[in-house]
């Protein structure tokens, strides 16, 4: 069932009512083909209206339905000879016009979704789906415009260069082929995207109270500075009354190449803070005398991110255990050494905010986390 729903995410599927109409027009009267196409279109709209409760949206059905409604005007004008021959082309022209108008309204539509009163996760999902729809709509518009241009060029060629078979292919078959290829292309693209998204890091989205209200891909969250509120864990390492600090990666999103704790991580969607702490410290979990202790929770915010920081501390007494976590770019820092370098850009923005608290509680934290049970 989930595979079926994923396939229905293909926005190009909305072309099916028009493709059905264009296909049937080759074998039945344009009026019967139109009735079947309209019926199928509204059945699809009803189906996706039901599926929208499961967060499956098919926006391309709306321009398809609009195209069929506009085509009905030609039926009222009693243009039988024209419709008998050119129904597929008229359908394509109307679709291109409808999609062009939608393209002009893109910013307005996305702005309304962005400022709507729906929950954040629902707004995010709808905007993502709409962006996919507008991408597909632009592709459809471009290809069918190209098709119409090819027909225009063909129509002005000398009679000696034209043939009945080629005319039938261009006027009645190529439009259907383009639609089918678009659906297949979009399905392949979605499958490839889903494969890459499985490797994506999914983060919980918090409200101001710190409760999870949805989730979003980390790459998407980072593309919109500090719009989403995410939880992270940070773990200070204390040894012999000193803090063990290492250099962050040069590719770090916040404070690259700055000095910081060796352990920090996002809390992933549907992961607990406790399990994230265990994952962060890795093999230290196997040491019986190493027990991470919670210190403080606070909100960190800069021009890029907004994070709910869960600060932990581990006290390491054993030199053997300390050797396990040592890194080439790490060393032990005394409080005095840290104070001398504060505000100089040496330390991460997180650490700059946390050090005063660590300094005032470090001895207490050391005694607390190293006590015997």
Image (cartoon, helix red, strand yellow):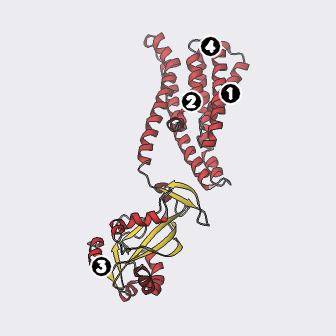
Pointer 2 or 4: first along the chain: 2
Q: Are marks 3 and 1 in contact (CB under 8 Å)?
A: no
Q: Are marks 2 and 4 in contact (CB under 8 Å)?
A: no
Q: Which residue is mark 3?
A: 318
Pointer 4 or 1: first along the chain: 1
- The residues tagged by marks 4 and 1 sit, at their Cα atoms, a distance apart of 17 Å
Q: Residues within 10 Å of mark 1 (few under 14, many from 20)?
A: some
Q: Are marks 3 and 4 in contact (CB under 8 Å)?
A: no
Left or right of 76 in this view: 64? left
Q: Which residue is mark 2?
A: 15
Q: Residue at x 33, y 71 (%)?
A: 287
Q: Which residue is mark 4?
A: 84
- Residue 215 spot, x, y in % from top left: 54, 55
- Which callout, 3 or 2, points to the residue nearer the camera? 3
Asked if 179 appears above or below 345 in the picture, the reply is above
Q: Which mark is residue 113?
A: none
- The residues tagged by marks 3 and 2 sit, at their Cα atoms, a distance apart of 67 Å
- Which callout, 2 or 1, points to the residue nearer the camera? 2
* Relative depth, front residue between 99 and 292: 292
């Amino acid at each position: 069932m989930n595979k079926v729903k994923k396939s229905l995410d293909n926005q190009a599927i909305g072309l099916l009512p028009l493709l059905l109409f264009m296909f049937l027009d080759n074998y039945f009267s344009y009026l019967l083909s139109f009735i079947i196409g309209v019926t199928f279109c509204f059945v699809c709209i009803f189906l996706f209206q039901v599926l929208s409760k499961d967060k499956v949206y098919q926006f391309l059905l709306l321009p398809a339905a609009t195209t069929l409604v506009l085509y009905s005007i030609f039926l009222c004008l009693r243009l039988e000879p024209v419709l008998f021959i050119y129904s597929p082309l008229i359908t394509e022209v109307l679709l291109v016009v409808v999609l062009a108008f939608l393209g002009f309204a893109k910013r307005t539509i996305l702005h309304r979704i962005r400022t709507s009163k729906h929950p954040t996760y629902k707004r995010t999902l709808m905007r993502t789906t709409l962006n996919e729809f507008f991408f597909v709509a632009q592709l459809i518009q471009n290809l069918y415009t190209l098709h119409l241009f090819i027909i225009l060029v063909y129509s002005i060629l000398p009679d000696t260069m034209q043939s009945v078979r080629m005319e039938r292919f261009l006027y009645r078959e190529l439009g259907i082929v383009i639609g089918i290829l678009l659906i297949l292309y979009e399905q392949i693209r979605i499958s490839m995207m889903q494969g890459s998204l499985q490797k994506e890091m999914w983060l919980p989205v918090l409200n101001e109270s710190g409760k999870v209200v949805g989730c979003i891909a980390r790459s998407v969250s980072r593309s919109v500075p500090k719009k989403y509120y995410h939880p992270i864990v940070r773990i200070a390492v204390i040894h012999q009354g000193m803090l063990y600090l290492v250099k962050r990666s040069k590719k770090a999103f916040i404070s690259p190449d700055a000095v910081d704790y060796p352990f920090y991580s996002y809390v992933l969607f549907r992961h607990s803070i406790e399990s994230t702490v265990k994952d962060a410290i890795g093999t230290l979990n196997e040491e019986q005398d190493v027990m991470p202790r919670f210190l403080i929770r606070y909100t960190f915010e800069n021009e890029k991110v907004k994070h709910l920081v869960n600060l932990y501390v581990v006290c390491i007494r054993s030199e053997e255990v300390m050797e396990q976590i040592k890194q080439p770019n790490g060393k032990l820092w005394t409080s005095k050494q840290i104070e001398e370098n504060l505000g100089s850009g040496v330390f991460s923005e997180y650490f700059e905010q946390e050090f005063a608290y660590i300094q005032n509680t470090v001895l207490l934290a050391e005694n607390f986390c190293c006590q015997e049970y």
